[in-house]
Every structure is written in structure tokens, then in C-alpha cells.
Image (tube, grey):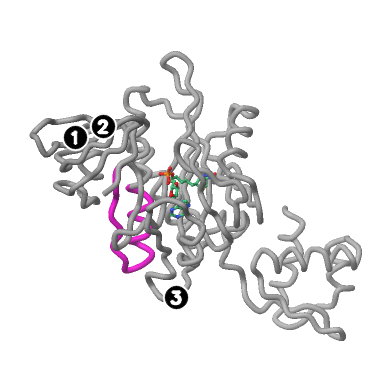
């Protein structure tokens, strides 16, 4: 049991105040050890009142996805079952997950969550801003699906995020190629997959998910250099949501779509992705290293590439790793 969790369960057993001395005795630690754990629990979002004479009282539980709270409510078969790691601050959960996957062969399903990231990254090493209040998490997977199918994994993950936001709120997010989640034309979440492969074998896939849950999107945009319009769930709703709840639902949908990937043909996933997207027949600019092409989105093919018809009637096939697309 986590040291903080032990103090928490003692506080939970009492309706009123419990003295530091009694807590220390029950937990078998010093009084200063108790104050340290209380300080940490407050950092983890618990509201704990203290009174010089009476001691401590738990007023409200946290809304953050700390491991012991998330594990209690998470309804999955394997995701988050072995281990959930939580950091108040991390450079990047993706980086931590890669290190762990390299070290621990039996790490499938480990979830790493941070309250904030100091060096969050997007695809192609782009910066991902991750202030406190968002959902920044990475999951270690070891897919046994053929490598040829793995191109649709990012699409399956984006579908999971989209469904989770829809289930938690009344908002109607839409998917944008390749794997952005948008609300009212503004980016609310992004997906990143890091693959380690040998020949045709997948060693591991690290799924990175970033969701602007309770972050101030105006402040966020002031730090962004790109054209991207951004939003957050709380700015769209006008109130804050439970990060614990959205994290739980996201992981449950993620596991469902990941397990489905084994038995489903890529076509079915791309069709589902298209049903959750509004990009078909949308005007786009495809920005390559040397050339920018304007056209209309005709289709997303089963390998995940984008089919764009240019104004002079040519069809071009666009792969996400090679270009940026502006809608
Ligand atoms: C993505 O990349 O959208 C994938 C983002 C994945 C982030 C997660 S958080 C947990 C895990 N740990 C990490 O270090 N990363 C993953 P991409 O499609 O390349 O989009 C990057 C672009 O989105 C940037 O160039 C900015 O324009 C924009 N951007 C940066 N921060 C943003 C934010 N918080 N919300 C919306 N857009 C943002």
C-alpha cells in the first residue's frame, strides 16, 4: 500500500477529526511523517482540514487520477491492472513509458499519468503544452497484431478519446486527420504512438494521449507558435470536469478498441473513424517539405493515408509522417 493511501484510509474511517498522534500510532510512523503525508495528499487534490487541537479531517476526496483512486473504479481487463504510475510533474509520460518498456518485458497495460509535463511532445518531436489540469498519459502495449495492421492503431486510439469525451460530457468532438480530436474546429486532444519494431515484429507500442481537460485554453494559445486553434473541455462546458472520471472512461474505451483491433479489419476501424470525423469533402492544404498543395479531401484509405483531389483534378495520397495538413 502507498504510504499516503494508508493515512488516507485512516482518515476515511473517522467521521470527525483524528489527531496526528493517533494517526502516527495507527500508521506506525512519526508525527512529522504524518504531516508529510498530509501535505502530499493535499498536493494530490484531497481537501484535508487541520485543527491545532483536534488534528486532521478529510473534507473531500480528490478528482485526480491517483493510482489508488483510479484502480478502484477502472473497469478494464488488463489496462492499468498491473500498475498505474502517477507523477505531479514529469518531463514526459511518453519518455517514462519508453524507459519502462525497454526495461520490463512484462509491462503491457502499465499506465503512466502526470498532472503536468515540462517537456511534453507531439508527433515529429513537436512541442506539446501540458500544464496542470490536463490529462497527460501514456500506456505501454505489446500488440501481437500483424505489423501491417498497426497503421490503424492511432485511429483506434483517437476514436477511444472521442467516445470518452462524448460519454463524459454533452460535447460532440470530431476527429481530424491524422489523429486530432477537435471541438468546434479547435484542438482539444492529440494522440501520439511510439513504436519499437524488429523486422516485422512489434516489441512495444507506447500510446500517448493528451487531453485539454481543465486547462485555460486562452493561456495555452498564447504559448503556441502554430496556426492551430485550441480549446479545452472546461472552456467549452463552462465548468471543470472530473479528471479521474474522464481518465477512467478514456482507458476503458482505449482497451476496448485495442482488443477489437485483433479481430477487426482495418477497413472497419477507418470507417468508424470517418463516421466520427467531418473532414470528407473539406478543403485542405497539404504542406510538404518543398511543396504546398491545395485540394479537397476525397477519402481516408484503409492504411490510414489521406486521399486529396487537387484543384486540377489529380488525386494524391498523403501519409501523416511526411506532411502537415491544414484544414
Ligand atoms: C499530438 O501531436 O497531437 C500528440 C500529442 C500527445 C501528447 C501526449 S501527453 C502524454 C504523452 N506524453 C507526451 O510527451 N506526449 C504525449 P501533433 O499532432 O504533432 O500536435 C502537436 C501540435 O499541437 C503542436 O505543434 C502545437 O501546434 C499543438 N499543441 C501543442 N500543445 C497543445 C495542447 N495542449 N492542445 C492543443 N494543441 C497543442
Q: Of the two numbered discs 3 and 2 on the same chain, state the one appearing first in sequence.
A: 3
For the residues labelled 2 and 1, the Cα–Cα distance comes to 6 Å
Q: Which residues are magenta?
A: 159-177
* Contact? badges 3 and 1 (CB < 8 Å): no
Residue 258 drawn at (x, y percent): 38, 39
Q: Residue at x 13, y 36 (%)?
A: 309
- Residue 239 tag number: 3
Relative to 186, is 2 on the left or the right?
right
Relative side of 300 to 147, left or right = left
| Residue at disc 2, secondary structure | strand
Expressed as whole percent of the image width and height from the top left, the position of residue 13 reads 71, 73
Q: Is residue 186 left or right of residue 122?
A: left
Would you name the residue on which mark 1 appears?
Answer: 307
Vertical comparison of 229 with 302: above or below: below
- Label 1: element kind: strand
Classed neighbour count for the residue bearing mark 1: other residues with Cα under 10 Å, few (<14), some (14–19), many (≥20): some
Residue that label 2 marks: 318
Does 272 sit above or below residue 104? below
Q: Quadrant of residue 18?
A: bottom right
Instruction: Check residue 242 for magenta coloring.
Output: no
Q: Nearer the viewer, mark 3 or mark 2?
A: 2
Question: Relative to residue 94, is residue 240 depicted above or below?
Answer: below
Q: Residue at x 47, y 29 (%)?
A: 195
Of the image marks 3 and 1, the number of the one nearer the N terminus: 3
Amino acid at each position: 500500500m502507498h504510504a499516503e493511501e494508508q493515512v488516507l484510509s485512516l482518515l476515511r474511517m473517522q467521521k470527525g477529526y483524528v489527531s496526528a498522534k493517533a494517526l502516527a500510532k495507527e500508521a506506525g510512523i512519526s508525527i512529522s511523517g504524518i504531516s508529510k503525508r498530509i501535505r502530499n495528499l493535499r498536493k494530490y487534490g484531497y481537501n484535508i482540514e487541520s485543527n491545532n487541537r483536534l488534528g486532521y479531517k478529510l473534507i473531500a476526496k480528490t478528482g485526480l487520477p491517483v493510482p489508488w483512486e483510479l484502480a478502484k473504479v477502472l473497469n478494464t481487463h488488463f489496462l492499468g491492472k498491473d500498475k498505474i504510475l502517477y507523477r505531479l510533474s514529469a518531463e514526459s509520460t511518453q519518455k517514462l513509458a519508453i524507459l519502462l518498456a525497454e526495461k520490463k518485458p512484462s509491462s503491457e497495460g502499465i499506465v503512466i499519468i502526470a498532472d503536468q509535463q515540462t517537456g511534453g511532445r507531439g508527433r515529429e518531436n513537436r512541442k506539446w503544452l501540458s500544464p496542470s489540469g490536463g490529462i497527460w498519459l501514456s500506456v505501454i502495449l505489446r500488440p501481437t497484431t500483424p505489423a501491417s495492421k498497426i497503421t490503424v492503431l492511432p485511429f483506434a486510439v483517437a476514436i477511444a478519446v472521442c467516445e470518452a469525451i462524448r460519454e463524459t460530457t454533452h460535447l460532440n468532438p470530431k476527429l481530424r486527420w491524422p489523429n486530432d480530436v477537435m471541438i468546434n474546429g479547435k484542438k482539444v486532444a492529440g494522440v501520439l504512438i511510439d513504436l519499437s519494431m524488429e523486422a516485422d515484429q512489434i516489441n512495444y507500442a507506447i500510446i500517448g494521449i493528451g487531453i485539454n481537460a481543465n486547462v485555460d485554453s486562452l493561456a495555452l494559445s498564447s504559448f503556441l507558435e502554430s496556426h492551430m486553434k485550441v480549446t479545452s473541455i472546461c472552456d467549452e462546458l463552462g465548468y471543470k470536469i472530473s479528471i479521474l472520471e474522464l481518465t477512467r472512461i478514456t482507458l476503458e474505451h482505449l482497451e476496448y478498441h485495442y482488443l477489437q483491433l485483433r479481430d477487426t479489419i482495418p477497413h472497419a476501424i477507418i470507417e468508424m473513424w470517418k463516421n466520427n470525423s467531418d473532414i470528407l469533402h473539406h478543403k485542405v492544404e497539404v504542406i510538404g517539405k518543398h511543396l504546398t498543395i491545395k485540394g479537397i479531401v476525397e477519402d481516408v484509405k484503409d492504411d490510414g493515408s489521406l486521399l486529396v483531389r487537387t484543384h486540377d483534378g489529380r488525386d494524391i495520397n498523403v501519409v501523416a509522417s511526411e506532411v502537415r495538413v491544414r484544414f
